[in-house]
Image (cartoon, coloured by chain):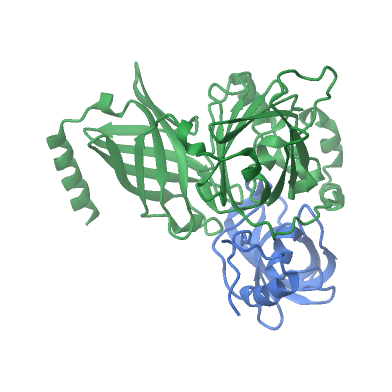
Amino acid sequence: MAKLPGTSVLNSIRIMSLALLFCATNSSAHHSYAAEFDADSPTTIEGVVKEVWFKNPHIRYYVAVTDEDGNEVLWDARGLAPVKLVRMGWTKKTIQVGDKIKLYGHTGHTNKTIMSILDITLEDGRVLTSRSVAYDIKEEKE
Amino acid sequence: MRALFVFLSLAVSFASFADDEDFIGKWTLRISAAGIAAYEGLLEIEKHDDGLRAWVENGPAPVKVHGNQIEVTIDSRDRQGFKFYRVLEGRLDKGEIAGVIRTADILESAAENGEDGSPWTAVRSVDAKSRGGNHALRDFDGTWVGIRGVDIRKYTMDLTDKAHEWLTAYDARMDEPQKRCVSPGLVAATTWIFPFELIVSEERNRLTMLYEAFGLSRRVHMNQTEMPEFYPESSMGYSQGRLENGELIIETTLLAASTRDFNGEPVGDSTRVEERYFLTNDGNRLNLVMYMHDPENYNRPPIRRRAWDRNDEALIFPFECDPDSFFRQLFSEGRMQEYIDRSYMRP
């Protein structure tokens, strides 16, 4: 039977900390991204986290990015709902203010400093994916 | 290679003498993709003055028939709300259709389970009376965890002019309820993948359903024939249930006007939602087929599906929601006044 991570939270987090490294193939969301984000232009940005907003309906990281002219621009990047991310071991503490991160995702149709996150690369090279569905993940045997 | 396949297919079709009439009627679609539950759907084909027309899950789906070859194009929504196309090419043989699916305009972010090239079948729809098995009401009690697949997520439905007008004016960036932490409503919430708990209280003739999504809850009044006189409209409505042939049937009315899906298609306040839940023989998988009856907005009732696996050890997480980031973005983009001015889109 499918075992839902969260039944044994610590165990799940330990398991899923490894799973953060894999690249899942499915996005999941409960908002209409198509109305706001441009599917044809996935973009990568790098910057320093200024604020962590780890709440429903979707997490956000406000990230300071230096543009081509040398100006600091504040990006508003959002990911999945926390209830989904915590089951993958991605918690409020995973990314903190001051962290340098690389984000990959879709930018807005009109606002080019908002992003729907697909992946985040941490300084240590770990890749967090904000695409996975996670609810029917089968727990691995230790 | 593909040209050879098409040539051989056409050659076979000319020899098989099938015609349009053989495709007319209701079919049960099944698309098998590796690693997930098969997608299922209703395909209905009718003959009109201008030729054959098809609907999938009661939304229009262009169809081409040549001899015993058929091609049905289904616009579908990926998990992020982007549209892509499933093109079902198949062949009718001995009363069944079988073929392979190809996908078009699919995005990297979607990559819908790698179903391109997967097999699909369609068999004549039959009366589903037997699918409930011998299950009792208490068998539905438990915590249910959503699984991937099952729902085709048909993108376009058969809208009335009134609904078209609404949809044209809808701007999901500002009007979508859940963005500001407002309940998305019964139709959307019950088909999301979030887990939920179903508590059966036979002595009180009541079901209680507790959803992780937005912390929603609802009560289902079993075997009730009358409606309360002053029950208010709400996003989850007023639900009455019954067990028929092992199948749990819930009908819900008194729904507040809302939206059906991410695109903003309306749910009118006269909507009646019919949910049909049935279990697998072992009682460990719960299936839902939902019909949304709203003739003011839909010429045919949209169909949605969902399936869950039983996991009574699973936790339902709290879902406290804070709209702060939504309003902050509106302010930073200078759209706050526009948001206020379009309050008529938030009934």
Task: Judge left or right: residue A138 versus residue B25.
Answer: right
Q: Nearer the viewer, residue B263 or A64?
A: B263
Task: Judge left or right: residue A13 versus residue B112.
Answer: right
Let me know if residue B174 appears in the view: no
Where residue B121 appears, as percent x and y from the top left, is 35, 43
Residue located farthest toward the front when viewing the structure as drawn = B203
Let me know if residue A99 appears in the view: yes
Q: Which chain is blue?
A: A
Where residue B14 appears, as percent x and y from the top left, is 14, 35
Q: Which chain is green?
A: B
B66 vs A78: above or below: above
Name the quadrant of the N terminus of chain B.
bottom left
Name the quadrant of the C terminus of chain B.
top right
Residue located farthest toward the left when viewing the structure as drawn = B15
Where residue B33 appears, as percent x and y from the top left, is 43, 55
At x 30%, y 46%, the residue is B99
Q: Nearer the viewer, residue A76 or B87?
A: B87
Task: Judge left or right: residue B246 versus residue A65.
Answer: left
Q: Nearer the viewer, residue B231 or A30?
A: B231
Where residue A67 appears, as percent x and y from the top left, is 74, 69
